[in-house]
Image (spheres, helix red, strand yellow):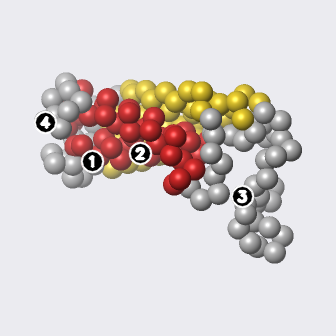
Amino acid sequence: MSEFTHFSPDGASRMVDVGGKAVTRRTARAEGIVLMQPETLRLVRQRDFAKGDVLEVARVAGIMATKRTADLIPLCHVLPLDRADVQYSFPTENSVRVEVCVSTEAKTGVEMEALTAVSVTCLTIYDMCKSVDRGMEINNIRLLEKTGGRSGHFVRNS
């Protein structure tokens, strides 16, 4: 395992110096699952909530979150993002799977942007549906894949 890069040799917090790194294509994919009652999911999929279209509001929230990651996560670099894509699938009768893909050409990766977007998308789904289902759960937020940079290609084993 390599050393933690956000600490100096004496243990002080620091922003990693990426000044000497080359600009390369960077991508990251992350996912999360929102578990809810089947009736709640039916309302979501039918776009039948008084607050509006849950999935579209959550999609915009996730995209916006990618752009604010450096404001939320200490020591993250501000990155010029080329793409932030939020997609949904419904693996069971009571779950929404959120997958986010983010890409850039930069000196550092976009894993935190993808993970932040998944988190905020899931939280927005929860917020918009909590009036009918307070027992929802947000699970399995994790990085699925990343490309670019010195550490190369990572793909999570299923």
Badge 3 crowding class, 10 Å Cα cut-off, few under 14, some 14 to 19, many 20 or more, is: few
Residue ID for mark 4: 50
In terms of depth relative to the viewer, which is nearer, 64 or 44?
Answer: 64
Residue 45 percent coordinates (x, y): 24, 26
Distance (Cα) linking label 4 and label 2: 21 Å
Split into 4 quadrants, where in the image is the N terminus?
bottom right
Residue ID for mark 1: 127
Residue ID for mark 2: 120
Q: Tag 2 or tag 4, which sits nearer the N-term? A: 4
Split into 4 quadrants, where in the image is the C terminus?
top right
Distance (Cα) linking label 1 and label 4: 13 Å
Distance (Cα) linking label 3 and label 1: 33 Å
| Circle 3: element type | loop
Residue drawn at x 84%, y 70% is: 9
| Circle 4: element type | loop
Residue ID for mark 3: 15
- What amino acid is at disc 1? Asp
